[in-house]
Amino acid sequence: MRSGRLEALRTPDLGVVEEAELAAATEYIEALSTDFRHDEYSDPYRAALLAVIEAKAELQDQEPRVRSGSPSTLPELIAALKAAVEETRVKKEQPAKKQKRLTTADV
């Protein structure tokens, strides 16, 4: 039974390849073949990656930016934030007003 399985896996006998057929196939392959020219091909992923790397390298070479705005704006922002937090807390503590439900008669 084992030899029957192996027979099923073997390729069919297609006959002998003649020298003229082999020579014609070789000639055809050589006619289609050319030298590989690397400069004719591009890798867009590699180009994009190199652009990102170069941009990051340029940013590291620059001096750090100084934040704009006067130092007095920070306390003002903190005060506004505290006021907003307090307003939200007060709204949450107040009981919610019941809204009148609309019925079809109201519409």
Image (cartoon, rainbow, N blue to C red):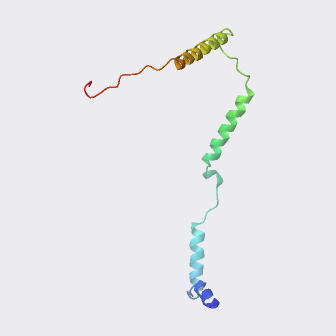
Vertical relation: 30 (above or below) 21:
above
**Image position of 28 (left or right of 104):** right
- Choose between 60 and 26: the one closer to the eye: 60
> In this view of the protein, which residue sits in the foreground, 65 or 72?
72
Q: Total label count?
A: 0
Q: Is residue 51 left or right of residue 24?
A: right
Q: Quadrant of residue 61?
A: top right
Which residue is at 69% across, 38% downward?
A: 53
Q: Judge whether 29 appears above or below 104 on screen.
A: below
Find residue 25 and report its horizontal and vertical position in percent: 57, 76
Residue at the image position 43 percent from the left and 19 percent from the top: 97
Residue at 62% in and 91% down: 1
Occupied quadrant, residue 30: bottom right
Q: In this view of the protein, which residue sits in the foreground, 10 or 3?
A: 3
Q: Position of residue 47 (x, y in %)?
A: 64, 43
Residue shown at 65% from the left, 46% from the top: 46
The image position of residue 19, as x and y in percent, is: 60, 84
